């Protein structure tokens, strides 16, 4: 920067826009040019203005008064969204003068609440599945099983394959008194994997085992626990 006081540069730079556009009277332009010839800093400022000047030169002056139009359909889309929000949030939108702001606020709050709600959502307790050993009879059937205790009884989750397709299998639960209680039936699906939940009225603490019998009443598999 030259030795001139800072105000001189500042005042000159305020005129650089006009200068860059080629405007201003000859005396002013000569004074500015004289300053620029001796001031690299102000020349740099002018250099920054030149690209802007080039862009401004492309502007059609006849269109400067035109207000840029939003894309067609935007207004209807916004109004539709607001109407939908008003139906969901009728109380909060009682003050119609502020409805636009409230809609935006409500949408943001809903989004924030959703995010927060998701973070603090109650995570369900994992189902307490108690794996139990299964003994199969015959080479065809493979199975595993787990127990789920309920207030109303006990659920047997049976996974297996090799149950003859279309054959009805009967499941029983045996309680500690030796009573055999029905726990439902299922249809075999052949080699495909079968996932079956069977419900028994025997409480877990009273149950000592379950069994699966085929249509002839033959024991197919059993579990003692
Ligand atoms: Zn200067």
Image (cartoon, rainbow, N blue to C red):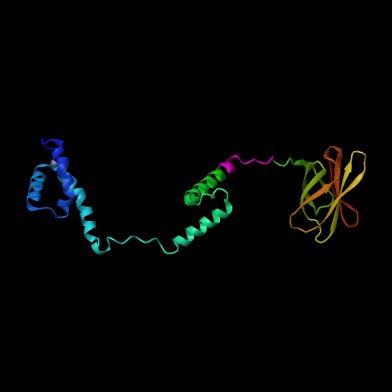
Horizontally, is 139 left or right of 18 in the view? right
Residue toward you, 65 or 165:
65
Where is residue 157 drawn, in percent x and y? 77, 47
Which stretch did the figure color magenta?
116-125
Horizontally, is 20 left or right of 176 in the view? left
Where is residue 22 drawn, in percent x and y? 14, 55
The answer to if 121 sits in the magenta stretch is yes
* Ligand 1 in which quarter: top left
Residue toward you, 212 or 119:
119
Which residue is drawn at the image coordinates 93% and 39% (left, top)?
Answer: 177
Quadrant of the drawing holding the C terminus:
top right
Quadrant of the drawing holding the N terminus:
top left
Which residue is drawn at the image coordinates 13% and 35% (left, top)?
Answer: 5
Where is residue 217 drawn, in percent x and y? 91, 54
The answer to if 57 sits in the magenta stretch is no
Horizontally, is 53 left or right of 159 in the view? left
Residue toward you, 164 or 22:
22
Where is residue 114 drawn, in percent x and y? 56, 45
What is the tally of numbered marks visible in this picture? 0
Which residue is drawn at the image coordinates 23% and 62% (left, top)?
Answer: 61
């Amino acid at each position: 920067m030259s030795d001139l006081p800072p105000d001189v540069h500042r005042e000159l730079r305020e005129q650089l826009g006009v200068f860059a556009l080629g405007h201003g009277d000859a005396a002013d332009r000569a004074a500015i040019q004289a300053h620029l010839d001796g001031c690299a800093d102000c020349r740099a400022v002018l250099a920054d203005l030149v690209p802007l000047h080039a862009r401004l030169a492309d502007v059609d002056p006849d269109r400067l008064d035109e207000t840029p139009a939003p894309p067609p359909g935007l207004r209807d889309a916004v109004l539709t969204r607001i109407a939908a929000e008003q139906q969901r949030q009728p109380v909060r939108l009682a003050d119609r003068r502020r409805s636009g702001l409230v809609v935006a606020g409500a949408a943001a709050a809903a989004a924030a609440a959703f995010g927060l709600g998701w973070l603090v959502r109650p995570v369900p307790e994992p189902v307490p599945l108690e794996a139990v050993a299964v003994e199969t009879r015959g080479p065809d059937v493979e199975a595993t099983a787990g127990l789920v205790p309920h207030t109303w009884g006990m659920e047997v989750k049976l996974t297996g394959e090799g149950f003859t397709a279309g054959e009805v299998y009967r499941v029983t639960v045996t309680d500690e008194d030796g009573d055999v209680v029905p726990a439902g039936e299922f249809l075999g699906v052949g080699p495909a994997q079968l996932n079956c939940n069977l419900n028994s009225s025997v409480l877990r603490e009273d149950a000592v085992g379950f069994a699966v019998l085929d249509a002839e009443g033959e024991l197919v598999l059993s579990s003692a626990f």
